[in-house]
Image: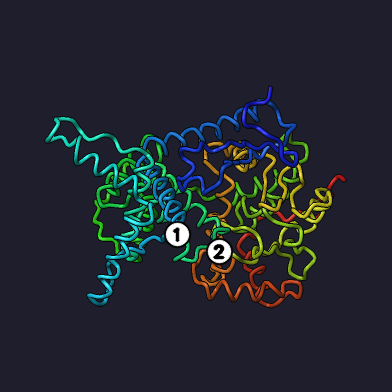
């Protein structure tokens, strides 16, 4: 049985839902009548996986709908009335602010604009119902005369009232700044590259705050209340104090940028976040244990063995690369036939742009070539199509990245490694440690790991990387640094892959 709102698209399931008319004007929907989210699951996926992912997206839509309706009804109503009022003016060939007196440079010009107002009110017929209603309220239903409250304003009269305000208000009058205005301002003003993973995370963190405050007017009180409620929600999710503080800094950066750029006179109180949880220190892998892992990843007799796992771990154990970088590699990024074998991390998606770099691969080069051949199914990606594929919209996982990480981490818990807490990310920290122990210069360490935000270093390394096939001296020097630092690894290049 196919769940509601589920539709196939190019062999994959998509959750597709029409946005209700009463909330369509809210900026959350980005003026789109259909809200679409991919499940990232093929149509022949197991039923339970499809239902689980469908439920997540269904809950997300329902929560967003409820949030917009409960928190922002005044915003939606005001925008809808303004839209209708603008259409009403155009019907009578009038323009917003056309009847504004502000900015008149002389008495005669002020008189001319005043006469324009009178003409619009009396002669065009655009505001006749508003006049009649006002007159009726003054004559018959005023509370002080009859003891009754005035009648509720009819919709057609309300439109004319909004149109009159729009017609007479000055062009310099600024609409109130809403929370929904702040991220687009920040993204544009900072010229953020939204293909950069770090910037994507910034937007996700802001969205979590925006989901709390809604598209309300930005005031000191609304900021203060919103930040407090957001902090309490993060605490209820059992997020670490350090993470909450980091995300808070990012949210406040967006707010402060708007204060500076728009001249907002808002003062707010930053919520206190006491650091009670201990900072987690990722363990580095000892030489003995790294050697143990290095040897086990080639063991085809293990039940967990698969060629793609060996390929990824062979790179991770001898470099600064992390899992997400390796899984996004294209075959053209892997230059194992160069005089200095390496991979190029300039054209793939990275955690931050500062990590663009060349990664020499001095160990098990021939083994990597064999693995690439086994995984070659004519695809562009280094990994087989059973793991990941590249589409026009970016990378799509046929299984989640967290699942891939979980499978690889089994190698870091085999035998007596269980109690050390090693993970795939431990290889990056261990790599840096062994570079430092070997006395490698800090500049070369920065080149190898992208640990420095120095853009000059990044530009220099890019220059060398573009000529990697010619084995320039710099890339060779980095390869020597890696070999010296990880000399204790057993480089068993003579292993023959069982094709």
Kindly identify which numbered label has been placed on residue 93. 1
Mark 1 is surrounded, within 10 Å at the Cα level, by few (under 14), some (14 to 19) or many (20 or more) other residues, namely few
Seen from the viewer's position, the closer of residues 402 and 146 is 146
Q: Classify residue 75 by image quadrant.
A: top left
Toward the top, the furthest residue is: 1
Q: Is residue 276 above or below residue 115?
A: above
Whether residue 154 sits left or right of residue 348 in the image: it is left
**Could you say where residue 180 lies in the image, as x and y percent from the top left?**
41, 51
Q: Is residue 224 above or below residue 263?
A: above
**Could you say where residue 440 lies in the image, as x and y percent from the top left?**
55, 69
Q: Mark 2 points at which residue?
A: 353
Whether residue 282 sits left or right of residue 242 in the image: it is right
Toward the right, the furthest residue is: 499
Mark 2 is surrounded, within 10 Å at the Cα level, by few (under 14), some (14 to 19) or many (20 or more) other residues, namely some
Q: Residue at the spot x=62%, y=27% of the render?
A: 4
Q: Distance between the residues labelled 2 and 1?
A: 52 Å
């Amino acid at each position: 049985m196919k769940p509601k709102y589920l539709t196939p698209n190019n062999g994959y399931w998509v959750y597709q839902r029409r946005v209700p008319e009463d909330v369509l004007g809210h900026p959350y929907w980005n003026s789109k009548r259909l809200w679409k989210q991919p499940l990232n699951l093929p149509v022949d996926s197991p039923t339970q996986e499809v239902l689980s992912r469908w439920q997540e997206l269904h809950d997300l839509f329902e929560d967003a709908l409820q949030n917009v309706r409960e928190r922002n009804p005044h915003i939606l109503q005001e925008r809808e009335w303004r839209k209708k009022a603008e259409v009403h003016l155009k019907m009578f060939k009038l323009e917003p602010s056309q009847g504004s007196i502000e900015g008149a440079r002389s008495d005669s010009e002020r008189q001319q604009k005043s006469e324009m107002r009178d003409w619009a009110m009396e002669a065009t017929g655009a505001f006749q119902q508003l006049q009649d209603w006002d007159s009726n309220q003054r004559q018959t239903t005023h509370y002080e005369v009859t003891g009754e409250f005035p009648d509720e304003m009819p919709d057609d009269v309300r439109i004319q009232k909004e149109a009159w305000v729009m017609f007479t208000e000055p062009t310099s009058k600024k609409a109130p700044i809403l929370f929904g205005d702040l991220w687009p301002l920040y993204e544009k003003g900072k010229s953020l590259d939204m293909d950069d993973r770090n910037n994507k995370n910034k937007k996700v963190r802001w969205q979590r705050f925006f989901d709390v405050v809604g598209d309300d007017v930005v005031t000191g009180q609304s900021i203060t209340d919103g930040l407090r409620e957001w902090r309490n929600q993060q605490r209820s999710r059992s997020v670490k104090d350090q993470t909450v503080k980091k995300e808070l800094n990012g949210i406040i950066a967006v707010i402060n940028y708007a204060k500076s750029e728009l001249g907002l006179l808002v003062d707010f109180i930053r919520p206190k976040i006491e650091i009670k949880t201990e900072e987690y220190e990722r363990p580095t892998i000892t030489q003995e244990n790294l050697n143990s892992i290095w040897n086990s990843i080639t063991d085809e007799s293990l039940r967990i063995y698969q060629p793609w796992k060996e390929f990824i771990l062979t790179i991770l154990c001898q470099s600064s690369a992390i899992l997400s970088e390796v899984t996004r590699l294209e075959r053209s990024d892997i230059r194992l036939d160069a005089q200095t074998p390496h991979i190029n991390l300039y054209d793939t998606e990275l955690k931050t742009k500062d990590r663009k770099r060349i990664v020499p691969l001095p160990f098990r080069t021939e083994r990597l070539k064999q693995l690439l051949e086994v995984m070659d199914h004519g695809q562009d990606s280094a990994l087989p199509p059973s793991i990941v594929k590249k589409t026009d919209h970016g990378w799509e996982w046929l299984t989640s990245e967290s699942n891939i990480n979980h499978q690889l981490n089994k190698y870091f818990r085999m035998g007596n490694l269980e109690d050390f807490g090693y993970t795939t990310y431990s290889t990056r920290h261990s790599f840096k440690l062994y570079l430092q122990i070997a006395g490698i210069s800090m500049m070369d360490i920065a080149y190898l790991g992208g640990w420095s935000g120095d853009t000059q270093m990044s530009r220099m390394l890019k220059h060398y990387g573009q000529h990697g096939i010619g084995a320039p001296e710099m890339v060779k020097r980095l390869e020597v640094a890696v070999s010296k630092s990880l000399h204790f690894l057993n480089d068993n290049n003579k292993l023959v892959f069982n094709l």
